Image (spheres, helix red, strand yellow):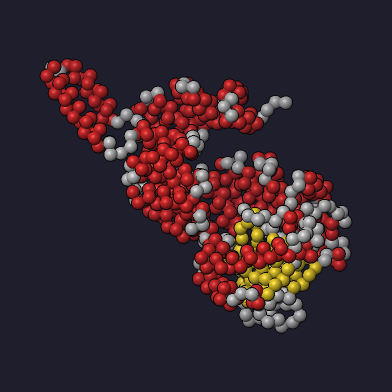
């Protein structure tokens, strides 16, 4: 069977990574026979040529790759490096200047620029030719002056690491030789503790190795030594963001932007941090700033789409995702996010197509399979739905979505399927009173009201919520210091829940992740407020802490209802088993995320405030 261009490229890259250069070259050349200007095939073929010391042969290949797609940073770096290897320094300088206009990282260009023969040395060479016409005494005088200058320069350079050493350090980092890069960076920082570049590389290497606290220290040292270096501030921000020190990360990115306003990566990363802080409005502005500086920035278009989706502006989110798809058609996550937006807009057939495209690009993405499964169920595509459900069951996959849809499809179609998540989810609902075990007023109520009254967290669009609002982002990340004690209590309650059902054979218990994170948000409702039936598709175990529940004026008003599915799922609504939980202030309810749940409308002058959360696998 003849390979497609994409399949040939993937195989070529795989062979290239394994060091099978002849196989890789054969596949790249096969692509070029069909598409002579294919950017990746030209570039990768050039990389092979450089690796066997044929930089001259690589130059035309790199040039074609750049002409075909000037938006790939590595194409610029490879071309400049080959020009330097061929000692085409003037051409290399010109290409470096062109690369700057395409937002290639300045730090990487700086390393390459340092490899260029300085202009004064070129002038000295030209002067040496001219000196042939001078008298012998004049030549000696000139040479003497030149030697003095070189000696002076050498003396000055002795205070700093050699350029050869720095080039070797950067090459190790760029080629993924992190152990070698770390050893060399440590050695340089010990011998030249005031030279910032080695600290920057050390910070990057430690971050790549997952040693983030050490990376912060190295990046902070780089910032101290080079406070005007925008890249150093941005690097520090990246590590602080990963450590969820979001306010500090925001400050670092803002400093980077103050030093270099036209810094698209810093605007993009600032947008990510603001989004994580729940500040969707200002995150939107940061992403748009990044896009304005680099219109081809696919990730910025995609994350802008995520932000607009959170804000409930689905038409705008769709436009952002579609622009991202044009720029990165091979990026599965964008197709998935586009599918989510189209599903929210009720365009299920288009959503299904987007999910399938995402799966074609990344067949192992279990979460996209879940989205596709739900989409097929909502379209009532019975045969396609059961085909996908059987596939997931046979893959020994489980999730809240699979658990929920196994129950709902049994109600709807009368066909029982193995439920790998939880076959009897109503048996795993636990209702506790936190008032009896903790200082609920100080730990939960006061802190919740402070967070909500600060108005620093954006609200997100929630179509299921009537007469109320929901905070955006993960409140446990946004207000980590304020919620630390709450998180500790909830983790303790989760462990007690696990112990309560320890003997169970349900996947919910047996496969519940031990390495998990808590994702939480506040919901505030006013009189007449309610929450329609739904499940938490990304959770494993779901929970609700009732910060304030107004006194009930009648029956079950304001109560929590959990059920196997929606009433419309079942041929006979009596088949849809339910539990009504009479929650009060201080209640904690833990239940499988697969359970459909809703809130009965209530009437009161008081706000009904709930902290909802999911246990998610890290």
Seen from the viewer's position, the closer of residues 111 and 359 is 111
- Using the image, determine if residue 144 lies above or below residue 432: above
Quarter of the figure with residue 169: top left
Q: Along the horizontal axis of the image, is 597 left or right of 272?
A: right
Query: Which residue sits at x=63%, y=29%?
Result: 11
Could you tell me residue 553's position as x and y percent?
A: 71, 83
Seen from the viewer's position, the closer of residues 524 and 302 is 524
Could you tell me residue 550's position as x and y percent?
A: 66, 80
Residue lying farthest to the left in this orientation: 137
Which part of the image, by quadrant, shows the N terminus? top right
Query: Which residue sits at x=71%, y=48%?
Result: 369
- Using the image, determine if residue 611 lies above or below residue 585: above
Q: Along the horizontal axis of the image, is 599 left or right of 281?
A: right
Could you tell me residue 71's position as x and y percent?
A: 49, 38
Could you tell me residue 72's position as x and y percent?
A: 50, 37
Residue 555 visible? The answer is yes
Q: Along the horizontal axis of the image, is 486 left or right of 90?
A: right
Seen from the viewer's position, the closer of residues 438 and 452 is 438
Quarter of the figure with residue 438: bottom right
Query: Which residue sits at x=52%, y=73%?
Result: 450
Query: Which residue sits at x=58%, y=21%?
Result: 22
Residue 280 visible? The answer is no
Q: How many marks?
A: 0
Seen from the viewer's position, the closer of residues 285 and 89 is 89
């Amino acid at each position: 069977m003849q390979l497609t261009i994409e399949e040939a490229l993937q195989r070529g890259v795989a062979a290239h990574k394994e060091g099978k250069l002849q196989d890789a070259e054969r596949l790249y050349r096969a692509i070029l026979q069909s598409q002579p200007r294919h950017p990746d095939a030209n570039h990768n073929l050039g990389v092979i040529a450089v690796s066997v010391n044929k930089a001259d042969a690589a130059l035309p290949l790199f040039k074609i790759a750049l002409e075909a797609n000037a938006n790939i940073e590595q194409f610029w770096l490879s071309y400049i490096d080959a020009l330097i290897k061929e000692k085409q320094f003037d051409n290399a300088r010109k290409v470096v200047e062109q690369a700057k206009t395409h937002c290639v990282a300045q730090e990487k260009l700086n390393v390459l620029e340092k490899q260029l023969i300085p202009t004064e040395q070129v002038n000295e060479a030209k002067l040496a030719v001219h000196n042939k016409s001078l008298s012998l005494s004049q030549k000696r005088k000139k040479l003497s002056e030149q030697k003095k200058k070189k000696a002076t320069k050498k003396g000055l350079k002795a205070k700093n690491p050699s350029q050869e050493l720095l080039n070797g350090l950067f090459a190790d980092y760029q080629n993924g030789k992190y152990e070698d890069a770390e050893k060399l960076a440590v050695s340089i920082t010990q011998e030249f503790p005031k030279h910032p570049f080695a600290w920057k590389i050390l910070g990057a290497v430690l971050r790549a190795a997952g040693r983030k606290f050490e990376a912060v220290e190295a990046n902070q040292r780089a910032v101290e030594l080079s406070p005007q270096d925008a890249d150093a501030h941005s690097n520090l921000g990246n590590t602080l963001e990963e450590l969820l020190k979001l306010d500090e990360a925001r400050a670092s990115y803002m400093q980077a932007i103050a030093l270099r306003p036209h810094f698209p990566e810093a605007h993009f990363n600032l947008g990510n941090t603001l989004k994580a802080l729940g500040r969707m409005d200002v995150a939107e502005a940061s992403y748009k700033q990044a896009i304005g500086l680099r219109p081809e920035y696919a990730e910025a278009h995609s994350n802008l789409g995520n932000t607009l989706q959170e804000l409930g502006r689905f038409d705008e989110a769709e436009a952002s995702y579609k622009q991202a798809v044009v720029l990165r058609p091979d990026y599965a996550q964008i197709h998935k996010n586009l599918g989510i937006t189209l599903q929210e807009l009720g365009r299920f057939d288009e959503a299904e197509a987007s999910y399938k495209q995402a799966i074609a690009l990344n067949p192992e993405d279990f979460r996209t399979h879940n989205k596709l499964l739900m989409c097929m169920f909502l379209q009532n595509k019975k045969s396609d739905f059961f085909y996908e459900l059987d596939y997931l069951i046979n893959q020994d996959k489980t999730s809240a979505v699979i658990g929920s849809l196994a129950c709902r499809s049994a109600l709807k179609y009368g066909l029982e399927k193995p439920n790998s998540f939880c076959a009897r989810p109503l048996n795993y609902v636990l209702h506790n009173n936190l008032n009896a075990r903790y200082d609920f007023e100080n730990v939960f109520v006061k802190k919740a009201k402070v967070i909500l009254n600060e108005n620093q967290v954006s609200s997100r669009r929630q179509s299921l919520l009537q007469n109320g609002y929901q905070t955006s982002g993960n409140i446990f990340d946004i207000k980590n210091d304020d919620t630390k004690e709450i998180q500790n209590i909830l983790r303790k309650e989760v462990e007690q829940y696990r112990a309560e059902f320890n003997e169970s054979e349900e996947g919910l218990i047996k496969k519940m992740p031990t390495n998990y994170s808590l994702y939480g948000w506040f919901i505030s409702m006013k009189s007449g407020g309610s929450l329609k039936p739904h499940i938490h598709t990304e959770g494993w175990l779901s929970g609700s802490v009732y910060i304030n529940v107004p006194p009930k004026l009648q029956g079950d008003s304001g109560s929590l209802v959990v059920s196997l599915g929606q009433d419309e799922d079942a041929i006979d609504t009596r088949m849809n088993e339910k539990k009504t939980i009479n929650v009060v202030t201080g209640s904690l309810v833990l239940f499988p995320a697969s359970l459909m749940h809703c809130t009965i409308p209530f009437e009161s002058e008081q706000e009904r405030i709930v902290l909802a959360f999911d246990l998610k696998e890290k």
